[in-house]
Image (spheres, rainbow, N blue to C red):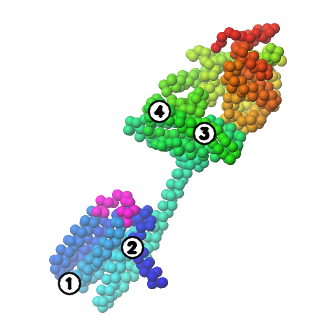
Amino acid sequence: MTILSARQKLQHFMSVQSENSDLLKAQYRAFTRQMPMMYFILLSSTWALAITHMQFAPLWLTVAMPALFTAGCMLRVMFWWRTRGIDPKPDVAHAALVRANRLAIGIATIFTAWSFLLVPYGNAYTQSHVAFYMAITVISCIFCLMYVRSAAFIVALIVNGAFVVFFVASKQPTFIAIAINVLLVCAGMMSILMTNYRNFERMVVSQQRTQALSNENLQLANIDSLTDLPNRRAFFAHLEAELEKAKVEGTRLALGVIDLDGFKPVNDLYGHSVGDRLLVKVSSRLATALKASRAFRLGGDEFAIVAPIVPEDEQLVANANAISEQLRAPYHMPEGTVHVSASMGIAVFPNLASTLEQLFDRADYALYHAKKTRRGGAVLFDAEHEKQINIEARIEHLLKQADLENELSVVFQPIVDVCCQKTVGFEALARWSNPTLGHVSPAQFFSIAERAGIVGSLTRPLLKKALACALKWEEHLRFSFNLSAHDLNSCEGVLSLIGIIENSGFDARRLDLEITETAFAHDFEQVKQSVEVLRRLGCGISLDDFGTGYSSLTRLHALPLTKIKVDRSFVTGLHERPASYKIVKSLLTLSRDMGLECVVEGVETPEELAALAGLGGTLVQGYVYSPPLREEDVGEFLSRKSIDIAVTGHQ
């Protein structure tokens, strides 16, 4: 067993190990750097020894043999010099090191034999030179071969073994002493070489582990831990690389940005664990639906697709709609069947987008329009969108430069109790007249202000103006004012609103502050806290455009609401559309069951009004009674003994 173990160890030392590919490559690189030096030392020492023996030994020993050695060594030097900068494959490195082992046997044997052939010639000095040559050369070669342990052992065994045996057999005390000395020195050197090699091996293994850890960290940094899709960081890196490739090759590149419609109510109703599992299922479907394209998770319920192979625009939109259709199919969970849809915005390079920033922004803009006009479908960014971007950019610029105190104004639309045909309050509506743009639609400038994060600068002057007007009304009239989600997103914003209300002198108990369901898409806990503070002040809280968003009943119960407002989209043609009739009926019933008042807005025709009255609706707002009124017209409207139903056209 011991003999077998020793033999196995010897075989291990004398062979090139191929288990660790990185170690093989490191050995190869170190070896190629040191081979030219080894051959230079070997040849210079050989010629020095040959020259000292030229007058004693035949020419074939002192000239022909060294010349032959030189030719062979120079060929090897040229080979290693050519390959010094190559990063070899593991099998190539292993083959080269095995060849080096074999050459070590041949070179050590030939040079040792040549040295012994010179011993009989000359005097004691030349014999001493032979001994010195063998000792110093083998030491130099061992050092040069230190990173190829097997070759170093082979050279040491052959040269030193022959050296010790030969000179001990000479029975000359000096040569015996030299042989013993060289043996001890070489033994010490081999011990140092072993230590050095182990350190070299540990260094390579340590570098492997560090590289593996670095690769793992890099993967973790670029992979979304929930869905296993590449994350936002990987997305921008990939998009940049594909964009550069498309520029060089002159090809098109498409970017699709996806947002899930109805995801937040799933989180609210079932909890975040179900929401996470839904995202995993969505990611799986998305990855399965794609072929040449790649999917990414940008964060939350937002995904992206980078498509380097782009068909014609019509087919591109058709493909995107097909993906949206697959994502719309029901998701069966243990907790229940979940339904979401996926809106997608698409932009194409180089069509209307020449940079990474433009491509992403325009895909995002197309997504915004998809959610507004084609929820659950795909919209391709086109020239009309670019025109709209330029218009909106101009509006945003002028909004930031505007004298809002003077340019903003307020109009008031009556809210009427249909049972007694009396006005119970007014809703304040914003108007903006700019010297450059003229009159700008509130639907347009408010959405731009919200996206630009400057809507608070509009809310404050409008609220001050509206409260100053409402202060002149009779005390039984209520006043409604719309708040943006941004107005509720911070304690500072709410405190600013409270300061305006308290300084106005208007009774907060007559004030209804309207929020939309889009506020729930923001920090709901902060929105809830803000609403509760305003409610404690005495303000009523109305949920505007009810039914158009994705708020769950859980969230409705969580807010201290006093009123809901039914969006006009359900009212238009109410008497002719059975689906709308049923929806409005359900919403009126829900409001009564929740103990909330219900205002139906956007009523424009006597037929719609009659249908609402038949459903039990009491509070109505719309052109059927009056368009929004200027401050000076409110008094005249209120002075009428009865409210006439208007049938004239309007804007």
Q: Which amino acid does label 4 sit on?
A: Gln
Q: Which badge, 1 or 4, comes first in the chain's sequence? A: 1
Marking on residue 15 = 2
Left or right of 399 in this view: 620: right
Image mark for residue 315: 4
State the extent of the magenta-drawn residues as a range: 79-94
User: What residue did someone put label 3 on?
Assistant: 329
Measure the alpha-carbon separation of dots 4 and 3: 21 Å
Disc 1 from disc 2: Cα separation: 37 Å
Is 324 above or below relative to 116? above
Q: Residue at x 56, y 16 (%)?
A: 436
Q: Which residue is drawn at 38% across and 60% down?
A: 89
Classify mark 2: helix, strand or loop: loop
Viewed as shown, does residue 294 lie left or right of 579? left
- Nearer the camera: disc 3 or disc 1: 3
Q: Which mark is residue 121?
A: 1
Q: Residue 91 is drawn in which quadrant?
A: bottom left
Whether residue 86 is in magenta: the answer is yes
Front-most of residues 641 and 53: 641
